[in-house]
């Protein structure tokens, strides 16, 4: 059996619409293996979001001490899970600090299928087996995590987890889990909604379409000089500049056979890049480097095609502008290659 269960895959929160604090009207796009066996995301009656008291989001979170080794282990798990990846570093620290230690004896039942969810668990040691209707479906051998789904959505536990060999779990309770993640989600939504309203090309989207776009955006951070996009790479994402500045440049072959990078333009807050490579299905035609600390909102290729359809025409209209900038930097011959500076 694998040590990672289908229902604990880290994509579940994003695909189910964490930022809306409810399941989106995208049932046809939800993949079956994001959910536990016998859990049907299309049966709305089995999954509902709790009403969140906004005042409770500011309650103090308890602190539980850990050794450096334990903290490092938990940090590694939290950073790998998509559910926590969009959190700021200080928010991930709050999550880790709030996790409490639980010693588990052999044959002890940690989770009962059908029961209400109370905690999310990270395995420090021990062997744990997952059963669905008494059938063994997965084993956690001194690593792994489980319990995210029942914490995010008010649905029964999808499996029974039983300890086969005594060990130690680190638990995050439901209140803290929702408090930290939902507070972040609400703050992110407010920030991104305001930010997206200021971008002219997105005026083609309805309010509901912008809301769905907010849900799909992933914050990414870059240090000064870090290369965000490399010329010639395949296109995998589209970016908005949330804060800071980026420099767009292209590699040019000199007469002596050497290659130099020629600056094309600086992009600042509210700018975007990466659309043309996705629109034309061509490799990246330029480098994009961070200038100072930069925060971007990244949109995957699939989400770009699905959510920005109404904006495609306006984005394609900019191709001529990009080609002119390429011509000015590299000469008229560059236009024949179909390169565009913002193909990042």
Image (tube, rainbow, N blue to C red):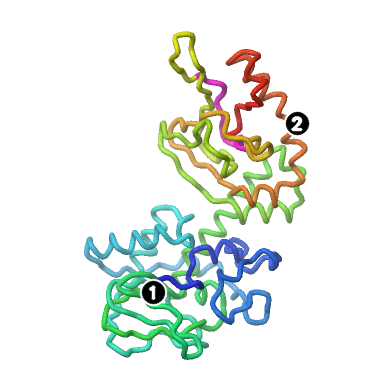
Q: Position of residue 34 (x, y in %)?
A: 56, 69
Sequence-wise, which precedes: disc 2 or disc 1? 1
Give the overall secondary structure of the magenta segment: strand
SS of the residue at dot 2?
Answer: loop
Stretch of the chain drawn in magenta: 262-274
**Residue 71 in the image, given as x and y percentages of width and height:** 28, 62
Q: Left or right? Give the position of 192 relative to 229.
A: right
On the rendered image, what quadrant is the C terminus found in? top right
State the residue at coordinates (39%, 72%).
Answer: 3
Residue 55 higher or lower than 169, as above or below: above
How much space separates mark 2 and mark 1, taking CA atoms?
50 Å
On-image quarter of the N terminus: bottom left
Q: Estimate how packed mark 2 is, as few (under 14), some (14 to 19) or many (20 or more) residues with alpha carbons within 10 Å.
A: few
191 part of magenta stretch: no
The residue that disc 2 covers is: 317
Residue pointed to by mark 1: 121
Task: Label 1, secondary structure: give it.
Answer: strand
Furthest residue toward top = 255
Q: 315 above or below 206? A: above
* Left or right, residue 153 beside residue 80: right
| Front position in the image: 192 or 344 | 344
């Amino acid at each position: 059996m694998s040590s990672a269960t289908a229902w604990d895959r880290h994509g579940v929160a994003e695909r189910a619409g964490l930022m809306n604090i409810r399941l989106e009207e995208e049932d046809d796009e939800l993949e079956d293996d994001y959910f536990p066996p016998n859990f049907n995301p299309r049966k709305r009656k089995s999954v509902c979001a709790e009403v969140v008291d906004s005042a409770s989001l500011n309650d103090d979170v308890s602190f539980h001490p850990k050794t450096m080794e334990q903290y490092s282990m938990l940090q590694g798990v939290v950073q790998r899970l998509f559910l926590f990846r969009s959190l700021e570093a200080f928010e991930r620290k709050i999550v880790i600090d709030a996790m409490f230690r639980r010693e588990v004896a052999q044959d002890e039942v940690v989770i009962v299928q059908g029961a209400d969810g109370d905690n999310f668990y990270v395995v420090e040691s021990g062997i744990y087996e997952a059963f669905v209707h008494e059938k063994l479906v997965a084993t956690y051998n001194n690593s792994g995590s489980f319990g995210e789904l029942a914490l995010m959505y008010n649905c029964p536990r999808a499996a029974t987890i039983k300890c086969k060999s005594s060990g130690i779990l680190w638990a995050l309770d439901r209140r803290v889990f929702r408090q930290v993640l939902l507070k972040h989600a609400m703050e992110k939504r407010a920030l991104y909604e305001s930010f997206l309203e200021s971008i002219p090309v997105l005026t083609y989207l309805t309010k509901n379409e912008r809301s769905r776009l907010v849900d799909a955006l992933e914050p990414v951070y870059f240090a000064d000089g870090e290369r965000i996009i490399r010329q010639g790479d395949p296109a995998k994402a589209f970016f908005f500049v949330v804060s800071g500045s980026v420099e767009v440049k292209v590699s040019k072959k000199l007469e002596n056979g050497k290659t130099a990078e020629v600056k094309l333009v600086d992009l600042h807050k509210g700018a975007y890049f990466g659309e043309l490579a996705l629109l034309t299905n061509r490799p990246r035609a330029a480098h994009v480097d961070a200038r100072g600390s930069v925060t971007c909102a990244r949109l995957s290729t699939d989400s770009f095609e699905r959510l920005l359809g109404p904006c495609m025409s306006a984005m394609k209209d900019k191709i001529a502008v990009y080609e002119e900038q390429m011509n000015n930097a590299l000469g008229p011959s560059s236009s024949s290659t179909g390169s565009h500076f913002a193909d990042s």
